[in-house]
Image (tube, rainbow, N blue to C red):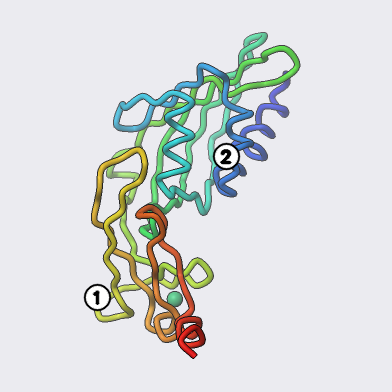
């Protein structure tokens, strides 16, 4: 295990898998007793983390690391860094700035992520702004005023959680040709308006 290896695993496997929603890669990287401690102090185990990622519609758009430091202790590596991330849940974007610690361990031939913990860097550093975006993944235009585009409401009920009312918006350009539909009370998708017209002919 070398510092270079750890840095490459953290950025090329861990952060990339989060951005690409590659849950199989994450499952392979997490140690069996993986522990995630979120900024609010809540603790999740491996299964809970994977379930939360799969059902929560959490998506990372960018993860930037700074002040990265790796300390090696034989079969254990401790990576600390400052991180700025842009993520979204169901089209609502949030930006976060936090300090993180990731503990990697050598298990046989492979290196696993055993622990990840992050601390929010307070109001002085972070801006937790919720920006509304067009729900069309190919567009994602920022929407500023409520008159811009069309608002849709769905009651979502993911397998793990209780029912909640969520709002989604399409920008005025996308809403000309598209509409939003809700599948299985858990997933919101765009659908072409013209498809409905063809179906009626
Ligand atoms: Zn749009």
Q: Position of residue 126 (x, y in %)?
A: 34, 46
Q: Earlier in the sequence, mark 1 or mark 2?
A: 2
Give the residue drawn at x 54%, y 46%. 64
Which residue is rendered at x = 33% and y = 79% of the image?
Answer: 149
Q: Nearer the viewer, residue 102 or 187?
A: 187
Q: Of tags 1 and 2, which is closer to the observer?
A: 2
At label 1, counting other C-alpha atoms closer than 10 Å, the crowd grade (few under 14, some 14-19, many 20 or more) is few
Neighbours of disc 2 within 10 Å: few (<14), some (14-19), many (20+):
some
Label pair 1/2, CB-CB below 8 angstroms? no
Which residue matches tag 1?
146
Q: Position of residue 71 (x, y in %)?
A: 60, 18
Q: Can you give x and y, in whole percent of width and height, for residue 144 in the image?
A: 31, 73
Q: Residue at x 38, y 56 (%)?
A: 90
Q: Which residue is mark 2?
A: 23
Query: Is 92 located above or below residue 174 in the figure?
Result: above
Quarter of the image where one finds residue 56: top left
For residue 60, side relative to residue 135 (left or right): right
Answer with the quadrant where ligand 1 appears in the image: bottom left
Location of residue 163 with respect to 37 vertically, above or below: below
Provide the secondary structure element on which disc 1 rests: loop
Q: Position of residue 167 (x, y in %)?
A: 28, 63
């Amino acid at each position: 295990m070398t510092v270079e290896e750890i840095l490459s695993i953290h950025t090329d496997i861990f952060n990339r898998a989060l951005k690409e929603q590659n849950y199989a890669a994450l499952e392979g990287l997490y140690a069996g007793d993986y522990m995630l401690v979120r900024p609010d102090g809540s603790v999740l185990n491996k299964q809970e983390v994977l379930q939360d990622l799969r059902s929560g519609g959490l998506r990372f758009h960018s993860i930037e690391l700074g002040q990265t430091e790796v300390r090696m202790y034989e079969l254990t590596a401790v990576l600390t860094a400052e991180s700025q991330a842009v993520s979204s849940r169901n089209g609502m974007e949030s930006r976060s700035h936090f300090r993180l610690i990731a503990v990697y361990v050598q298990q046989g031939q492979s290196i696993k992520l055993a622990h990840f913990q992050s601390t929010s860097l307070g109001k002085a550093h972070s801006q937790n702004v919720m920006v509304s975006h067009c729900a069309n993944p190919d567009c994602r235009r920022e929407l500023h005023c409520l008159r811009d585009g069309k608002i849709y409401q769905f009651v979502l009920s993911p397998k793990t959680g209780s029912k909640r009312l969520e709002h989604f918006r399409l920008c005025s350009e996308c809403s000309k040709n598209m509409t939003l539909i809700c599948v299985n009370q858990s997933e919101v998708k765009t659908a072409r308006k013209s498809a409905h017209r063809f179906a009626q002919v």
